[in-house]
């Protein structure tokens, strides 16, 4: 039985990001509890928890990244097993929240899938959700249980200052929706912001209309919550270069890197550096020369510690 700060806890890693889970385990000094995740011949998920969880505060680490539906279903079934085994608390650590881009209806008769996922997690037995840089902050309102939306911003700010990227710099939001996020980082490193005015004709496709702000002879720091196909990012960088930008750095919390995104980014030759977190586990074939990965293991371990101690989470946002 694992005890941490006088509490009975269990730390589980499902299949989506075992490397991050192991790092969190090492930061906390708490071993991962073994669990079995199997598939029947037809693809159905089956889980088994060999050790007792009765009366424990349980933490389950699982990014709902690609394959999204597989990882989500795996998580829901595992939560059901925990609830039926009388876990005291079921705390879900979602470094990446799948379906977060479907947070509102853009056209008639569209779903709000981010709300559906919130309902599924709650019904399955979650007592708390810990996530990182939700695509839209209002997703927190989809839950009727506590949710802590951590941010990689302090890690990015520290990295920028340590590498002196804030010299002659400007923080760039790739769209209007990220302006608030860009402003917070700009205030942290002592610079101004610019905004890319873009038009999105369909999912994973966008067209840059204008660059709002003076980026001439500036080191541009593009800040986004995720990189998916890379199209938006590359178009934004090209627009910045056309407006006289010097070096272009990109910081993103979630490296989805769908399809040939890494090849497109690497072959564009336009980025000095691309910095992401390990919220999504990247296979070696999706890594490229000027990519750098920052670990969020310490941040998550601190959040878990505060949940166990019933302590304030706010210091982690500074």
Image (cartoon, rainbow, N blue to C red):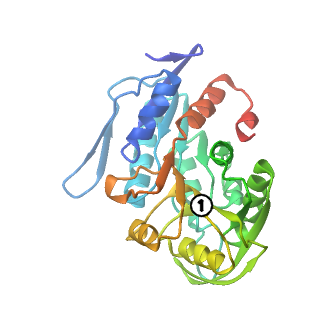
The residue depicted at 70 percent of the width and 57 percent of the height is 137
Residue 55 visible (yes or no): no
Q: Residue furthest top?
A: 6
SS category of the residue bearing label 1: strand
Where is residue 15 shown, x and y percent of the image? 36, 45
Q: Is residue 150 left or right of residue 176?
A: left
Where is residue 90 shown, x and y percent of the image? 54, 35
Where is residue 188 shown, x and y percent of the image? 77, 48
Where is residue 242 shown, x and y percent of the image? 64, 81
Between residues 201 and 210, which one lies in front from this camera angle?
A: 210
Give residue 91's quadrant in the image. Answer: top right
The residue depicted at 47 percent of the width and 70 percent of the height is 269
Q: In the picture shown, does residue 278 fall above or below 5?
A: below
Q: Which residue is mark 1?
A: 249
Q: On the rendered image, what quadrant is the C terminus found in?
A: top right
The residue depicted at 34 percent of the width and 33 percent of the height is 35
Residue 72 visible (yes or no): yes
The residue depicted at 55 percent of the width and 41 percent of the height is 296
Q: Residues within 10 Å of mark 1 (few under 14, many from 20)?
A: many
Between residues 270 and 109, which one lies in front from this camera angle?
A: 270
Q: Is residue 119 left or right of residue 15?
A: right
Q: Is residue 215 left or right of residue 81?
A: right
């Amino acid at each position: 039985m694992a005890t941490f700060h006088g509490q009975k806890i269990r730390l589980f890693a499902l299949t989506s990001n075992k490397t991050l889970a192991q790092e969190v385990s090492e930061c906390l000094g708490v071993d991962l509890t073994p669990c079995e995740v199997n598939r029947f011949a037809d693809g159905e998920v089956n889980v088994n928890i060999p050790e007792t969880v009765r009366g424990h505060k349980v933490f389950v680490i699982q990014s709902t990244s690609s394959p999204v539906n597989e990882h989500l279903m795996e998580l829901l079934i595992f939560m059901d097993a925990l609830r039926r085994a009388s876990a005291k608390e079921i705390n879900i650590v979602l470094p990446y929240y799948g379906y977060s881009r479907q947070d509102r209806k853009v056209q008639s008769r569209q779903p709000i899938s981010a709300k559906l996922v919130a309902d599924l997690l709650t019904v399955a037995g979650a007592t708390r959700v810990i996530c990182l840089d939700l695509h839209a902050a209002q997703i927190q309102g989809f839950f009727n249980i506590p949710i802590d939306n951590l941010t990689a911003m302090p890690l990015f700010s520290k990295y920028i200052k340590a590498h002196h990227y804030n010299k002659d710099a400007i923080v760039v939001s790739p769209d209007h929706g990220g302006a608030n996020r860009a402003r917070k980082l700009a205030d942290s490193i002592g610079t101004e912001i610019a905004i890319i005015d873009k038009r999105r004709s369909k999912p994973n496709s966008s067209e840059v209309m204008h660059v709002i702000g003076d980026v001439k002879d500036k080191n541009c720091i593009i800040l986004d919550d995720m990189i998916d196909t890379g199209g938006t990012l590359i178009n934004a960088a090209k627009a910045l270069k056309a407006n006289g930008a010097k070096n272009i750095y990109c910081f993103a919390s979630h490296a989805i890197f769908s399809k040939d995104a890494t090849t497109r980014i690497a072959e564009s030759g336009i980025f000095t550096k691309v910095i992401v977190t390990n919220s999504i586990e990247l296979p070696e074939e999706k890594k490229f020369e000027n990519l750098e990965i920052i670990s969020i293991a310490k941040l998550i371990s601190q959040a878990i510690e505060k949940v166990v101690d019933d302590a304030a989470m706010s210091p982690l946002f500074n």
